[in-house]
Image (cartoon, rainbow, N blue to C red):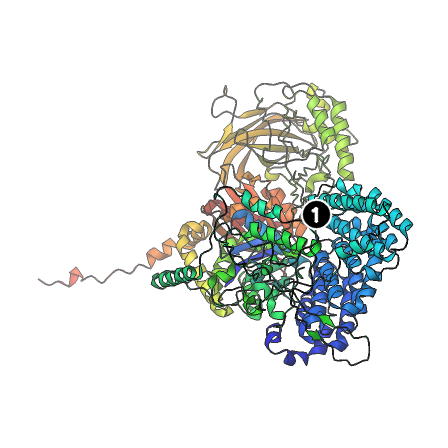
Amino acid sequence: MIKAILVFNNHGKPRMMKFYQYYAEDMQQQIVRETFHLVSKRDDSVCNFLEGGTLIGGSDFKIIYRHYATLYFVFCVDSSESELGILDLIQVFVETLDKCFENVCELDLIFHVDKVHYILSEMVMGGMVLETNMTEILTRVNEQDKIEKEEAGITAAPARAVSAVKEMNLPQKIKDIKLPELPSIGGLKF
Amino acid sequence: MSKILKTHPKSVQSHKDLVLQCLDDRDESIRLRALDLLYGMVNKKNLMEIVKKLMIHMDRAEGSYYRDELLSKIIHICSQGNYQHVTNFQWYVTILVELTRIEGTRHGNLISSQMLDVAIRVSAIREFAVSQMKNLLENAHIFANNCQRNGICEVLSAAAWICGEFSDYIEDIPATIETMLKPKVTILPGHIQSMFVQNILKLFARSVDKESGDPEEISKLIEILLEKLPLFIQSSDLEVQERACSSIQLLKYLQKIHNKNVDIGPEISVLFSGTLNPVAPKAQKKVPVPDGLNLDKWINEPISSSSEDDEECKKPATFFSSSIEATFPSKKKMPEPTEEELARRREERLQEQENNPYYLAGSTKSPKKKTSMPMSQSTDDIPVAAIELDVPLQISSSKSLFNIKSSDKYLIEAREEERRAIEKKNKKRLSKKSKKKKNHYSDEEIEPSVQHSVNVAFDMPEGATLSDEDAADNKAVDDPHRMLDINLDEPLKENEVLPVRRHRIVDSIPNDSADIPDGKKKKKKKKSKAESDKPAKTEKKKKKKKKSASTESNLLVEEDVTIDIQNHESIPCEEETLSLPTQGNKPKDDLITSKIDDQNDMNFWLSNDNEQEVKPAEQNYTETIEVTKKSEKPKKKKKDEKKKKRRKQSDYEIADGITTPSMERVEFLSPKPPSDVLLVASNDLIKIYMGTKVNRQSNSVSAKLLLQNSSERTTFKDMEFTVIDTTNIKLLREPSNGNHEGIKFPFVLQPLSEREAFVNFSISNVVKPQKLKGSLSYITKSSEGSSLEKLDFKLKFDCSMLLIPGNIDSAAFSNILASTDSMVKHSSECSSKKSDFNQILKDICLRARFSIVEKIDATASLYATSMEGHHVCLLIKQMGNSSLVIDGKSNDSSLISNVVSEICSIVSQM
């Protein structure tokens, strides 16, 4: 089971946090700090798996992390998860983010926090891994986007609406109205 | 592999070389794992090499946690299997001594117990050990500094004991006694001092024995002792005091006897004769209860616990005692539940659990989590013929020595401990009475080196049998309560220590605060440079001052940006402005303003450019002055902007002939309009520019109108500015005027000059762009004559023009974005000719009134609020092909879409 997923930058500033086990607010901050402390010391060529600190559960829990440019993606898992599998999961997550937001960077995680959480929920729910196939996840996320846009309706894009109205060529439309065939009166014979 | 090690050590051994290689790896995790595996790897031949390698590692080790690990590993490896792998005990003793030199370790106990163990069991090495210990004692002062619990100073107690017990091997006993009596000793912890005192006595006994022919020496010795021992009486530790007192009394008595020329030698030596052997852990329990003694019967009334103490006091603090079992029947206050009782309860509980549908059965994982912790020595590692020590090998495994389950555990334990200690030290054990089982274990020799036998004997009460089989703590393997065996006495390991929060000190870039004219705003909070959220705003400060003290256009608008957090360093300018009254139409003091201007100038030019700051593009222009205002400071005096325009000006244009009071300020026509204003209308003679700024105090928008007279000969006067109000936007006029009258500008516009004027509007709908129709009527005066003319214009108020840049930090920004109250999204893409992202950002901030929250490489997040309190958040990303992606979020959908499209058009125009 995955206990927590943390994303923080090179300075220890958390960009995204998701805990699958209840921790109080200050505990969460403490966990982030501790994890940052553990992970930042490590060179890039050393092992990506660490024993967890005591806050998050002690020696049973492992910390699996990956370092991309300015961000650390850290998954805290217990012994039932395979380390290499989780490593791959991190990769899938990051690639999905990259596909959804072009050139994803730290600020994207802050700005599109809802979308990031949607993507994460597609992959991990309640600490259990649901989906690891990137195309599948992307399909679902795109579907969700479409639904959002539809629901937003015309108010969401007044510019679009305005331009749609402008382009509506009313005179032409009137000319194009086809009247139904009416029986001609002239044909009546007395 | 570590799990395989337990069951199949042979298979792991074949990878020995690889594991040894791993020891040298850079990665600490790999090294730790290799250490775990080392248990199975050692044999006699490579033990020394491995330990040597580990010692080298220890020197290089970063972090004391790792060092401690190494240390304990070394010791565990060596002591495995009754030291089966150690061929050369001299070497081992030396290793132990070297280990004491490692600073900062918390395993002093471990080392000291090892020393004791080796010294006791390996009789052949005693001499060498004693000499080493003497050295240690002489260097005691090094250790005295490190007086924490479990620190290195523990080894001193071991050293003292060894010296005392095996004092045969010491040649110069008085010298050793001297070293133990040094005053520095009193710094040591109490238990060490008590050990010292006791062993001083032992040494004395030995020396008396040795020099029994020399009464002079003896009396000298006695005197020295009597002189120095009183030092210990004053110790705060009770044990030390007691021992010191008893020793002193004894010595005094002996002195008396000695002065009567009686040979005290033999008597004293009887004190400490006999060897002490390690005691089996269950020995105490196995003490057979003497007949006629009913342990369960209460001696006294249940209330008085003094009965137990009496028992204790009765037991004499004698040096002679015939047998172990004599005086210490264990007394239990509370009757323990008997075996049947326990079994019955267990049955009940299991029954209940079965019936309970919600009960989740416990896991059958290995209950002891000790296997992964190298520190604790699980009993699995030790073969069945186990070493049972009374000085525990682990730091605190008092639990494994005492197997008491009652709630009086601690009380009884403590008493047992004390009794045991006294037993060991004070009592003389007559060897005849106890049966010893001696197992001689001899090493198979590969080299004909010194062979030492390790004595694994231990003492048991008469008739008791070795019962190591219940070393498994008397609990069934599947007893769920086994998991409660948490050892709380262990000190915290490095990875269990919680990190202490320290204040992060950051060098804040010296805020070039005095860049008031440049409108750089900085945050009050310190942030790290890399993410310096120093949004620079170009706040346009409209300084309003009507030239003459005309009341009709006395719409003095106090500009204030309350949410901006400023630094306080722009004091010089501030103070000067503060000295001027905040209201009123006092005629300006040129001197002051020019002084301020110069200062602003200087500071501006001296400032270093922070990457996140948006330099107002109009610095080069004379007309506009940006001054940031401190929210706390009182309202600044409005300065006439024209005065500020002066600062960069060198020449005045003299008007031809006509001098009016308002004439003195004539400006050059700026070559191109400042970038904060937009062209509104123009004809041959005059151009009108407008720039807006939101005034949050009065919730209105003030517009700065720049009127440029581009003609060369025509003068404009009597200018009047009228607009047609709409429902959404109204011109704020003097109350006395009617609702449709215009605002008259009292100044005269000379040829080739420009003037500024300020008008205010109130806007009720900010989410849509507004348009206003208006006209400017004026009388032109030229050489040909004068005429009344009108210039019509349309004022367009974009949404983005009406935004107020917000000064928030990224945490608040994230909170706003994460809040669930409806944030609408809108995004678009546009391309810009410029490729400098910073420049683009600055322009956007300037034109669309945003502030940068955070900027990283080619992405930036911006924030602003609308007059009605909507949040507007933007994310701008520069893509590779010089296109810009703009994402926006706001509370209001039309607002955000308008803002985003406006920004797009701004960007494409750039």
Residue shown at 16%/61% (left/top)? A186
Circle count: 1
| Depth check, front residue: B707 or B762 | B762
> Could one spot residue A151 in this view of the protein?
yes
Residue shown at 48%/26% (left/top)? B740
Q: In which quarter of the image is residue B609?
A: top right
Q: Where is residue B497 in the image (x, y as percent from the top left)?
A: 64, 52
Q: Which residue lies furthest to the left in this view?
A: A190
The vertical placement of B888 against A177, above or below, is above
Of all chains, the one bearing label 1 is B
Quadrant where the image shows the N terminus of chain B: bottom right
Disc 1 target residue:
B529
Q: Where is residue B197 in the image (x, y as percent from the top left)?
A: 77, 49
Q: Quadrant of residue A66?
A: bottom right
| Depth check, front residue: B494 or B261 | B261
> Could one spot residue B833 in this view of the protein?
no
Badge 1 marks a residue whose secondary structure is: loop
Q: Where is residue A134 in the image (x, y as percent from the top left)?
A: 51, 68
Residue shown at 79%/56% (left/top)? B269
Q: Where is residue B679 in the image (x, y as percent from the top left)?
A: 60, 39
Q: What residue type is labelled 1?
A: Lys
B700 with respect to A47 (left or right):
left
- Disc 1 crowd rating (10 Å Cα; few below 14, some 14-19, many 20+) is some
The vertical placement of B850 against B361, above or below, is above
